[in-house]
Amino acid sequence: MAFLLALIQAQIARNEADLRLMKRIIGRDQRAFAELYDRYTSVIYTMVLRMVKSTAEAEDLVQEIFVQIWKKAHLFAESKGSVYTWVMTMARRKAIDKVRSQDYVNRGDSVDDDERPLDIPDAAFEANPLIATVSREYEELMRSSLVAISADQRSIIELSYYDGYTQAQIAERLQLPLGTVKTRMRQGLIKLRDSLKGRLE
Protein backbone atom coordinates (compact mmCIF):
# COMPACT_ATOMS: atom_id res chain seq x y z
CA MET A 1 0.00 0.00 0.00
CA ALA A 2 2.59 2.54 1.14
CA PHE A 3 4.77 1.43 -1.75
CA LEU A 4 2.10 2.26 -4.34
CA LEU A 5 1.29 5.62 -2.83
CA ALA A 6 5.00 6.40 -2.67
CA LEU A 7 5.23 5.65 -6.40
CA ILE A 8 2.47 8.13 -7.18
CA GLN A 9 4.05 10.82 -5.05
CA ALA A 10 7.49 10.09 -6.50
CA GLN A 11 6.11 10.44 -10.02
CA ILE A 12 4.58 13.81 -9.20
CA ALA A 13 7.91 15.00 -7.80
CA ARG A 14 9.79 13.60 -10.80
CA ASN A 15 7.50 15.34 -13.26
CA GLU A 16 7.92 18.66 -11.51
CA ALA A 17 11.71 18.26 -11.30
CA ASP A 18 11.82 17.38 -15.02
CA LEU A 19 9.81 20.48 -15.81
CA ARG A 20 12.27 22.69 -13.93
CA LEU A 21 15.13 21.08 -15.86
CA MET A 22 13.41 21.59 -19.20
CA LYS A 23 12.83 25.26 -18.51
CA ARG A 24 16.55 25.65 -17.82
CA ILE A 25 17.43 23.69 -20.97
CA ILE A 26 15.22 25.97 -23.04
CA GLY A 27 17.38 28.75 -21.60
CA ARG A 28 20.42 26.80 -22.92
CA ASP A 29 21.63 25.61 -19.52
CA GLN A 30 24.13 22.84 -20.27
CA ARG A 31 24.23 21.61 -16.68
CA ALA A 32 20.49 21.02 -16.75
CA PHE A 33 20.88 19.17 -20.05
CA ALA A 34 23.58 16.96 -18.53
CA GLU A 35 21.25 16.15 -15.64
CA LEU A 36 18.41 15.27 -18.00
CA TYR A 37 20.84 13.09 -19.94
CA ASP A 38 21.78 11.21 -16.76
CA ARG A 39 18.11 10.76 -15.87
CA TYR A 40 16.99 9.35 -19.21
CA THR A 41 19.97 7.69 -20.91
CA SER A 42 19.20 4.25 -19.48
CA VAL A 43 15.47 4.15 -20.21
CA ILE A 44 15.90 5.56 -23.73
CA TYR A 45 18.67 3.08 -24.49
CA THR A 46 16.50 0.20 -23.25
CA MET A 47 13.58 1.19 -25.46
CA VAL A 48 15.73 1.86 -28.52
CA LEU A 49 17.62 -1.42 -28.16
CA ARG A 50 14.33 -3.34 -28.14
CA MET A 51 13.53 -1.81 -31.50
CA VAL A 52 16.83 -1.77 -33.40
CA LYS A 53 18.23 -4.94 -31.78
CA SER A 54 21.83 -3.76 -32.08
CA THR A 55 23.83 -2.34 -29.18
CA ALA A 56 26.07 -0.25 -31.45
CA GLU A 57 23.13 1.25 -33.32
CA ALA A 58 21.22 1.81 -30.09
CA GLU A 59 24.17 3.70 -28.61
CA ASP A 60 24.46 5.89 -31.70
CA LEU A 61 20.72 6.55 -31.68
CA VAL A 62 20.77 7.61 -28.03
CA GLN A 63 23.36 10.27 -28.85
CA GLU A 64 21.33 11.46 -31.85
CA ILE A 65 18.18 11.60 -29.72
CA PHE A 66 19.80 13.81 -27.10
CA VAL A 67 21.17 16.13 -29.76
CA GLN A 68 17.62 16.42 -31.06
CA ILE A 69 16.28 17.07 -27.55
CA TRP A 70 18.79 19.90 -27.10
CA LYS A 71 17.97 21.44 -30.48
CA LYS A 72 14.20 21.13 -30.11
CA ALA A 73 13.81 21.91 -26.42
CA HIS A 74 12.04 25.16 -27.29
CA LEU A 75 9.25 23.12 -28.91
CA PHE A 76 8.32 21.43 -25.62
CA ALA A 77 4.82 22.48 -24.54
CA GLU A 78 4.03 21.99 -20.87
CA SER A 79 0.30 22.06 -21.57
CA LYS A 80 0.53 18.94 -23.76
CA GLY A 81 2.07 16.57 -21.24
CA SER A 82 5.09 15.73 -19.13
CA VAL A 83 8.74 16.09 -20.08
CA TYR A 84 9.02 12.31 -19.79
CA THR A 85 6.31 11.72 -22.38
CA TRP A 86 7.80 14.33 -24.73
CA VAL A 87 11.31 12.90 -24.48
CA MET A 88 10.21 9.27 -24.88
CA THR A 89 7.93 10.07 -27.80
CA MET A 90 10.79 11.84 -29.58
CA ALA A 91 13.07 8.86 -28.90
CA ARG A 92 10.46 6.40 -30.13
CA ARG A 93 9.96 8.31 -33.38
CA LYS A 94 13.71 8.47 -33.96
CA ALA A 95 13.99 4.72 -33.46
CA ILE A 96 11.05 4.07 -35.79
CA ASP A 97 12.76 6.16 -38.48
CA LYS A 98 15.84 3.99 -38.06
CA VAL A 99 13.86 0.75 -38.26
CA ARG A 100 12.20 1.98 -41.44
CA SER A 101 15.46 3.06 -43.02
CA GLN A 102 16.71 1.44 -46.21
CA ASP A 103 19.43 -0.45 -44.34
CA TYR A 104 16.81 -2.29 -42.29
CA VAL A 105 14.67 -2.98 -45.34
CA ASN A 106 17.68 -4.45 -47.13
CA ARG A 107 18.46 -6.63 -44.14
CA GLY A 108 14.94 -8.01 -44.17
CA ASP A 109 13.92 -6.62 -40.78
CA SER A 110 10.24 -5.89 -40.27
CA VAL A 111 9.10 -2.28 -40.52
CA ASP A 112 5.53 -3.02 -39.51
CA ASP A 113 4.72 -1.22 -36.24
CA ASP A 114 2.24 -3.96 -35.33
CA GLU A 115 5.01 -6.56 -35.28
CA ARG A 116 7.20 -4.67 -32.82
CA PRO A 117 6.40 -3.86 -29.19
CA LEU A 118 6.69 -0.08 -29.01
CA ASP A 119 5.29 0.57 -25.55
CA ILE A 120 6.97 3.47 -23.78
CA PRO A 121 8.32 2.12 -20.48
CA ASP A 122 8.02 4.03 -17.23
CA ALA A 123 11.33 5.60 -16.25
CA ALA A 124 10.98 4.66 -12.59
CA PHE A 125 10.22 1.04 -13.48
CA GLU A 126 13.16 0.70 -15.86
CA ALA A 127 15.56 2.30 -13.40
CA ASN A 128 14.82 -0.21 -10.65
CA PRO A 129 14.02 -3.88 -11.42
CA LEU A 130 12.60 -4.40 -7.93
CA ILE A 131 10.15 -1.54 -8.41
CA ALA A 132 9.23 -2.98 -11.79
CA THR A 133 8.46 -6.44 -10.38
CA VAL A 134 6.50 -5.33 -7.35
CA SER A 135 4.67 -2.55 -9.16
CA ARG A 136 3.41 -4.77 -11.95
CA GLU A 137 2.08 -7.28 -9.43
CA TYR A 138 0.06 -4.55 -7.73
CA GLU A 139 -1.00 -2.66 -10.84
CA GLU A 140 -4.33 -4.42 -11.11
CA LEU A 141 -4.92 -3.98 -7.39
CA MET A 142 -4.21 -0.27 -7.77
CA ARG A 143 -6.72 0.12 -10.60
CA SER A 144 -9.44 -1.80 -8.80
CA SER A 145 -8.94 0.24 -5.64
CA LEU A 146 -9.41 3.50 -7.51
CA VAL A 147 -13.14 2.77 -7.73
CA ALA A 148 -13.33 3.39 -3.99
CA ILE A 149 -12.70 7.11 -4.39
CA SER A 150 -14.79 9.83 -6.01
CA ALA A 151 -14.67 10.39 -9.76
CA ASP A 152 -13.14 13.85 -9.27
CA GLN A 153 -10.35 12.49 -7.10
CA ARG A 154 -9.83 9.45 -9.33
CA SER A 155 -9.43 11.50 -12.51
CA ILE A 156 -6.71 13.62 -10.91
CA ILE A 157 -4.78 10.63 -9.60
CA GLU A 158 -5.07 8.82 -12.94
CA LEU A 159 -3.82 11.87 -14.86
CA SER A 160 -0.82 12.03 -12.56
CA TYR A 161 -0.01 8.36 -12.13
CA TYR A 162 -0.86 6.96 -15.56
CA ASP A 163 -0.48 9.97 -17.88
CA GLY A 164 2.43 11.74 -16.23
CA TYR A 165 0.83 15.16 -15.73
CA THR A 166 2.04 17.50 -13.00
CA GLN A 167 -0.46 19.07 -10.63
CA ALA A 168 -0.17 22.38 -12.49
CA GLN A 169 -0.85 20.65 -15.81
CA ILE A 170 -3.84 18.83 -14.32
CA ALA A 171 -5.23 22.14 -13.04
CA GLU A 172 -4.93 23.63 -16.53
CA ARG A 173 -6.33 20.56 -18.26
CA LEU A 174 -9.36 20.31 -15.96
CA GLN A 175 -9.73 24.08 -15.64
CA LEU A 176 -9.52 23.92 -11.85
CA PRO A 177 -7.63 26.03 -9.31
CA LEU A 178 -4.28 24.47 -8.42
CA GLY A 179 -5.31 24.40 -4.76
CA THR A 180 -8.38 22.34 -5.64
CA VAL A 181 -6.25 19.83 -7.54
CA LYS A 182 -3.84 19.50 -4.60
CA THR A 183 -6.70 19.06 -2.11
CA ARG A 184 -8.49 16.44 -4.23
CA MET A 185 -5.27 14.54 -4.82
CA ARG A 186 -4.41 14.56 -1.11
CA GLN A 187 -7.91 13.42 -0.12
CA GLY A 188 -7.94 10.82 -2.88
CA LEU A 189 -4.60 9.39 -1.76
CA ILE A 190 -5.86 9.13 1.80
CA LYS A 191 -8.97 7.24 0.67
CA LEU A 192 -6.87 5.07 -1.63
CA ARG A 193 -4.56 4.26 1.24
CA ASP A 194 -7.50 3.25 3.43
CA SER A 195 -8.98 1.14 0.63
CA LEU A 196 -5.71 -0.68 0.01
CA LYS A 197 -4.87 -1.16 3.66
CA GLY A 198 -7.21 -4.06 4.35
CA ARG A 199 -6.47 -5.75 1.02
CA LEU A 200 -2.71 -5.80 1.53
CA GLU A 201 -2.61 -6.86 5.16
Image: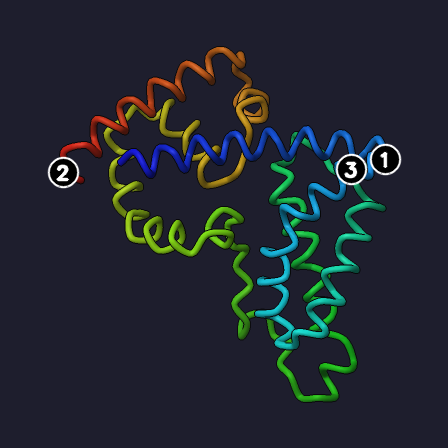
Tell me the quadrant of the picture where the C terminus can be found.
top left
Q: Position of residue 81 (x, y in %)?
A: 61, 36
Residue nearer the viewer, 37 or 83: 37
Q: For the residue marked with disc 2, what is the amino acid?
A: Glu
Residue nearer the viewer, 125 or 121: 125
Vertical relation: 37 (above or below) 113:
above
Please tell me whether mark 2 sits on a helix, a strand or a loop: loop
Which residue is depicted at the point 76% across and 67% down?
60
What is the distance, in whole Å, between disc 2 and disc 1 at their CAs? Answer: 50 Å
Q: For the residue marked with disc 1, what is the amino acid?
A: Arg
Circle 2 sits on which residue? 201
Q: Which mark is residue 28?
A: 1
What is the distance, in whole Å, between disc 2 and disc 3 at their CAs? Answer: 45 Å
Which residue is depicted at the point 35% across and 55% down?
133
Q: Earlier in the sequence, mark 2 or mark 1?
A: 1
Vertical relation: 144 (above or below) 172:
below
Which residue is depicted at the point 14% across and 33% down?
198
Which residue is depicted at the point 70% across and 52% down?
90
**Mark 1 surroundings: few (<14), some (14-19) or many (≥20) residues within 10 A:** some
